[in-house]
Amino acid sequence: MNDRTVEVLLVDDDHDEYLLTRPLLESCAPARLRLSWAADRDEMLEHISRKRVDVILMDYHLGAENGVDLIQELMEAGSEIPFVLLTGVANRAIDIEAMEGGAVDFLDKDGLTSLVLERFIRYAVERARLQTSEREANYLYRSLVEHIPAAFFISDASNYARKSYVSPQMVSLLDIDDNDETPWLDHIHIEHREAVAAQIAHSDLTGASPSISYQLHKRDDSLAWVHEEAVLVRNESGDPVHWHGVIYDITAQKRAEAQLYESKAELKNSNDALERSNRALQEFVYVASHDLKAPLVSIMGMATLLQQDLRGSLDGDPRTYLDRIVANAAKMRQLLEDILELSRVGSDEARSEPTDLDSVVTDVRDQLRHQLDARSATVTVDGSLPSVAVNRVHLVRVFTNLIDNAVQYTPHSREPRIWITARDMVKTWEITVGDNGGGIPPDARDKAFVMLQRLPSGRTLNPSGTGMGLAIVRRILEMNGGRCWIAESDERGTTMRLTFPKVVSDHAGNGKTPAAASEPGH
């Protein structure tokens, strides 16, 4: 016992017994025992209702009442106070009756000593404490088992399929009667029964923890998907005692998996159909472009010959008409080339690879040398451009379109100025391409990347483009995981921004030393 004073209540109709017992308890040092007295049942109940009582010493004879009957009455009422029955004479029948009635122990009053009394009281209190702890542990265990979102079971150590206990959730899961004695395997769907039986046999033989999913038949013949796991519990000697297991209802999960599988199958079918449609469209574009180019080349050739043969004899409207035929035929041919290239971008299987943007811009300036020199245009790279994970051919086309557009849409009253900068955005590179051109009206910016869309006439000089350039730029960027947009635009110029995926090994930059480069025509 701990240092707390143990409150002992003596229930005896003889006050002299109280006077004899009190000195015995007072001499039980170092134990701290305090004795109170009740002469009958009513006094005992009143005392219990007012004060804490740790143990009751109950006399067998209480006038017209029987101490054992009183113990049983209190036990049935839910009392958890331990009782020790006191008898005047040794009587085996009374002793057995007392123990069966709920007494912790019994003592013969004759020859009772302080040592014996203290030992019995200590035993009664300790036993009551252990019983209380056990009840609380069992309550917590039952509460846990009966409220977790799974069915708990206990099976025999030598026969896993024989479940000696199942939690209430099992009844709810299977929608069966509490007294259902159907063998567990009979609840399992026939298609899964053999596999489950084989794993159970393996667990019984080896002690390996089973983990298996299967379907169960419910009372209404519907099926529930469950997942079962268990562990083999052993005693201190290592011998198997029983299995502890849980069964989870995974019907909703299986249903979701089936729906996901169906959705994936539908998505695959849709993607396959879209891919077939795209291939058919690309083939059509290719064939149409090829078939249209042949007569168009013939028209251009004949018109050019007419220009040459009749140059000196035609003037006025006839000459203007012929010049328009040649110019429009050239535009039509370029438009067909652009449409064909746009279709190729969508189907291009060119592998993305680390590409140095500095070298790309240098190549584009060389290709556009004639156009740049003709307008005294300047292309400036501020600092050093990074390497990006985009195919080189695609990048050349992107910067060719952007620089060519900037030159074409700059009024003749200005010398075109184009500048290019790069900014590290952690996961991507942001490239800015600015110019001092005529700008793009606000109401036209949303359509700037749409095929065949061009600036309103009168805004700048009439450009020679087909309206496909920015559409191709956007298609290339989106296909490579980037994007592009118009950041700013007014009569002083336009600022375009593009994002490119980084090279995997490129974290802080490409290791180049920043250096500005600016020269006329470059």
Image (cartoon, rainbow, N blue to C red):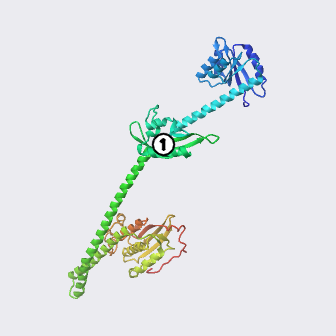
Judging depth in this view, the residue of 219 and 327 nearest the camera is: 219
**Picture residue at 66% right of the left edge, 30% below the top:** 129
Q: Quadrant of the N terminus?
A: top right
Residue 367 placed where, x, y %?
40, 80
Numbered-mark total:
1
- The image quarter in which residue 399 lies: bottom left
Residue 177 placed where, x, y %?
44, 32
Residue 322 placed where, x, y %?
23, 81
- The image quarter in which residue 193 lies: top left
Residue 443 placed where, x, y %?
35, 63
Say if 445 sits above or below 104 in the image. below
**Picture residue at 45% right of the left edge, 38% below the top:** 173
Judging depth in this view, the residue of 42 and 162 nearest the camera is: 162
Say if 397 sits above or below 205 in the image. below
**Three-letter amino acid code at the position of disc 1:** Tyr
- Reading the image, the residue beneath label 1 is 248
Farthest top residue in view? 64
**Picture residue at 43% right of the left edge, 69% below the top:** 495
Judging depth in this view, the residue of 510 and 172 nearest the camera is: 172
- Look at the image and tell me whether residue 313 can be seen: yes
Say if 295 sits above or below 52 in the image. below
Farthest bottom residue in view? 312
Say if 46 sits above or below 161 in the image. above
Q: Quadrant of the C terminus?
A: bottom left
- 320 displayed left or right of 245: left
Mark 1 surroundings within 10 Å by alpha-carbon count, few (fewer than 14), some (14 through 19), many (20 or more)? some
- 53 displayed left or right of 403: right
